[in-house]
Structures are given as structure tokens and as C-alpha cells.
Image (cartoon, helix red, strand yellow):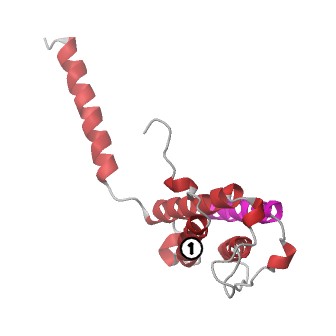
Amino acid sequence: MIPKTLVSSVIAVAAVAASALEAQQPQSVPRSITGQFEYVNRKVLEMAKDFPADKYSFRLKPEMRSFGEVIVHVASGVVYAAKAGRGEKAKWDELAPKDYATKAACVALMEKSFADADAVLKGEPAAGFTRSVEPWLDVLEHSAEHYGLLVAYYRANGLVPPESRPKPGK
């Protein structure tokens, strides 16, 4: 007869090994794109909420978009992704920054556009990604590019971006 402690130990080791093997397997395309899309756009949304309202009109250079205009620009891409993801005939229309003149308006726009796109993305069947990863991949890249730009807006104002701040317990 095999001792219960040995059986328990073997089961525990097998569970840990199975978990480690699962963690090593590459993510599926849908999970990878969905995760990255959410990750980047959540970071942009966090910046939109965090950046001081009195600095929303700040520009790195006069010919560049203000911080608030960059948020509206990113949201334009996210709105496009949601429309295209629903199968609507969509083109990348730039939302008018003048329609989102305050921090509150920019944050509300980003929250709404992100929630809408997130719902569409999560409703996309896995088979949909075998046909195409668009518009998600293009918009993901666009948002990530502008996330990097927004970091420069923080640094130029002597601020630390939320993602670069020390995390409690670390």
C-alpha cells in the first residue's frame, strides 16, 4: 500500500508541473491581442485621469498636439477599432479636440471609447482572428506609440508617469 503522504506529494508535484507547463505555452493570438490592447489603452486612460487638468493644453513644441489633443487622437483610433470590429464600414475619422476641451471631457471620451472597443474585442470569436488581426493590431500599435509620447509630456513637466512610479510593496 502506498502511503497517503506520498500520493499527496505526487499529486501536488504533478499539479505544479502542469501549471508550469501551461504557463510556458504561447498565448493564443486572440488572448495576446486582447491583453495587449487592454494593457496599453488602460495605461493611456490612467494617464488621462492622472495628468493635471491645468496642463492639458501643454505642447512639447508649438506645432505639436497638446496633451489633451493627444488623448482625443488616441481615442479616435480606439473608436475606429470598435466600429471596424463590429463590422461597420469605418474609416479613421479624427475626433475634433475642440469638442473635448476639458480634462473631464477627454477622460470621459477615453473611458467610453475604450469600454466600447473592449466589449467588441471580447465578443470577437477566436475564429475571427484567423481571418485578420485588424483593426486591433494597427490601433494597438498606434496607442502604444502615443503612450510613449505622453510619457515625454510627463517628463517635460517634471512629472513621473503612473507606470514609472514605485509600486507599494515592491
Residue 116 image-quadrant placement = bottom right
On the image, the x and y values in percent for residue 124 come to: 60, 64
Residue 15 image-quadrant placement = top left
Above or below, 35 relative to 166: below
Image quadrant where one finds the N terminus: top left
Magenta segment boundaries in residue numbering = 103-125
On the image, the x and y values in percent for residue 3 come to: 16, 11
Q: Dominant secondary structure of the magenta stretch?
A: helix
| Numbered marks: total | 1
**Camera-side residue: 77 or 121?**
77
**Camera-side residue: 50 or 8?**
50
Could you tell me which secondary element the residue under label 1 belongs to?
helix
Q: Residue at x 27, y 47 (%)?
A: 21
Q: Residue at x 21, y 14 (%)?
A: 5
Q: Residues within 10 Å of mark 1 (few under 14, many from 20)?
A: some
The kind of residue on which mark 1 rests is Leu
Magenta segment: does it hold 109? Answer: yes
Specify whether 103 is left or right of 86: right
Specify whether 102 is left or right of 90: right
Above or below, 131 relative to 156: below
**Camera-side residue: 36 or 1?**
36
Specify whether 13 is left or right of 113: left
Q: Residue at x 55, y 72 (%)?
A: 140
Residue under numbered circle 1: 149
On the image, the x and y values in percent for residue 39 come to: 54, 59
Image quadrant where one finds the C terminus: top left
On the image, the x and y values in percent for residue 78 come to: 67, 71
